């Protein structure tokens, strides 16, 4: 009847509005490194769109932002096709959502199997892929839209803790994935100097890292205090050389000379994840770099393979985000934004 039709039209209008808004915010964030809304606001809209699509599957399309990763690669850079797509992560915003994730994982796997998780800080920077051939760094790229990224080889070579040459018994062809970020000390002093020189200051360390990485002149990147931590692998020539757990593989990366965070831990179950999350949330302000949550990955590679992927993200991992600063402010009743 008429009222049903009105509500259907409303839903459709809201759906289109959300798609357009999110596409605009994606472009500002991923392509221009200049977001116009806080992440918490973006996350709310994204969640609303996901929920609308769940309730009204007829609205969802493969071109919806919920099915896509990141933004377009800028044509000013040479384009790089990722042999293994670089995906995003699903989010959990509270412990209930994390528990729902852990239950989904247990349901999909044989419930008799123990499931341990690898917990990592969610570094707030930009994802990069670094390819080594015969142990030599030959190419580095941004994530882009997950299929195609930007060639930023010369820029990544300027990051001091990225090895140009691997050591030990490394695979002949190895793609390392990780996060480039700007530690807080470097970020603050960069912004102070920029402000003193009346130059552009960065809104946050994430934008500083993404903006510094995507410079056409690598001598500019070289002056930025960037840092890298590896967190996974892409294409590898000989997988039989690799450990059977995610954590084991991170340790292999470390043996080959790649830096990894010293905050990574393996825990036996969801309770262990909760303890890890609470602990690092407490210490958040003392860390040398900004993190916006923790990333939790099923540790066993066989279990990861059984779980597989959906279009945008793996089923075996989740980003459990910290409360947004604005929400923290409300929770604690104090204004931190001086
Ligand atoms: P994401 O940042 O939520 O998660 C995926 C990314 O996490 C990976 O690409 C990787 O770069 C990073 N990461 C950090 N540590 C990691 C680790 N240990 N293991 C694996 N990955 C790790 O996903 P996304 O798709 O890059 O971005 C979505 C988020 O970006 C949104 O939730 C929102 O907060 C923000 N965003 C904001 C705006 C805005 O306008 N403010 C627009 C778009 C996106």
Image (cartoon, helix red, strand yellow):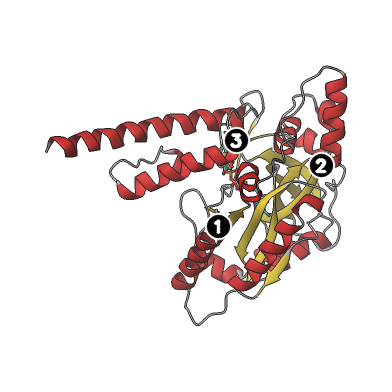
Q: Is mark 3 within 8 Å of ligand 1?
A: yes
Q: Is mark 2 within 8 Å of ligand 1?
A: no
Q: Nearest to the eye among marks 1 and 2: give it.
A: 1
The N terminus is located in which quarter? top left
Q: Residue 181 versus residue 84: which sits nearer the camera?
A: 181
What secondary structure is found at the residue carrying circle 2? helix
Residue 335 location in percent, x, y? 69, 40
Residue 171 location in percent, x, y? 74, 59
Mark 1 or mark 3, which is nearer the start of the sequence?
3
Residue 184 image label: 2
Q: Residues within 10 Å of mark 1 (few under 14, many from 20)?
A: few
Give the alpha-carbon distance from disc 3 to disc 1, as whole Å: 18 Å
Which residue has dot 3 on it? 38
Q: Residue 25 versus residue 147: which sits nearer the camera?
A: 25
The C terminus is located in which quarter? top right
* Above or below for 35 versus 90: above
Residue 326 image label: none
Which residue has dot 1 on it? 94
- Report whether 252 appears left or right of 105: right
- Report whether 154 appears left or right of 84: right
- Report whether 51 appears left or right of 209: left
Mark 3 or mark 2, which is nearer the start of the sequence?
3
Q: In the current view of this chain or complex, which residue is farthest to the left?
A: 1
Ligand 1, what quadrant?
Answer: top right
Give the alpha-carbon distance from disc 1 to disc 2, as whole Å: 26 Å
Q: Residue 99 versus residue 268: which sits nearer the camera?
A: 99
Mark 2 or mark 1, which is nearer the start of the sequence?
1
């Amino acid at each position: 009847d008429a009222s049903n039709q009105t509500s259907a039209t409303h839903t459709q209008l809201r759906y289109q509005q959300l798609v357009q808004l999110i596409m605009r915010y994606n472009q500002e964030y991923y392509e221009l490194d200049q977001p116009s809304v806080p992440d918490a606001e973006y996350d709310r809209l994204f969640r609303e769109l996901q929920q609308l699509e769940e309730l009204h599957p007829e609205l969802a399309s493969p071109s919806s932002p919920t099915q896509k990763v990141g933004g377009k690669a800028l044509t000013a850079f040479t384009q790089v096709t990722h042999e293994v797509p670089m995906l995003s992560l699903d989010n959990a915003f509270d412990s209930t959502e994390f528990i729902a994730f852990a239950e989904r994982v247990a349901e999909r796997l044989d419930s008799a199997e123990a499931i341990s998780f690898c917990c990592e800080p969610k570094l707030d920077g930009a994802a990069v892929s670094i390819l080594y051939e015969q142990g030599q760094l030959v190419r580095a790229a941004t994530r882009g839209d997950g299929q195609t990224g930007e060639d930023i080889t010369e820029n990544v070579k300027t990051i001091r803790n990225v090895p140009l040459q691997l050591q030990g018994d490394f695979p002949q062809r190895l793609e390392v994935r990780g996060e480039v970020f700007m530690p807080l000390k470097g970020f603050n002093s960069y912004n102070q100097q920029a402000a003193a020189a009346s130059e552009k200051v960065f809104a946050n360390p994430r934008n500083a890292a993404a903006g510094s990485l995507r410079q056409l002149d690598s001598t500019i990147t070289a002056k930025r205090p960037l840092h890298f931590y590896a967190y996974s692998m892409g294409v590898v020539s000989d997988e039989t050389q690799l450990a059977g757990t995610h954590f084991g593989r991170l340790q292999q990366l470390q043996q080959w000379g790649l830096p990894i965070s010293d905050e990574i831990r393996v825990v036996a179950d969801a309770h262990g994840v909760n303890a890890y999350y609470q602990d690092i949330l407490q210490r958040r302000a003392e860390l040398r770099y900004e993190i916006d949550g923790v990333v939790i990955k099923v540790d066993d590679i066989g279990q990861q393979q059984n779980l597989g992927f959906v279009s945008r993200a793996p089923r075996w991992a989740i980003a459990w985000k910290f409360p947004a600063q604005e929400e923290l402010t409300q929770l604690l009743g104090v204004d931190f934004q001086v």
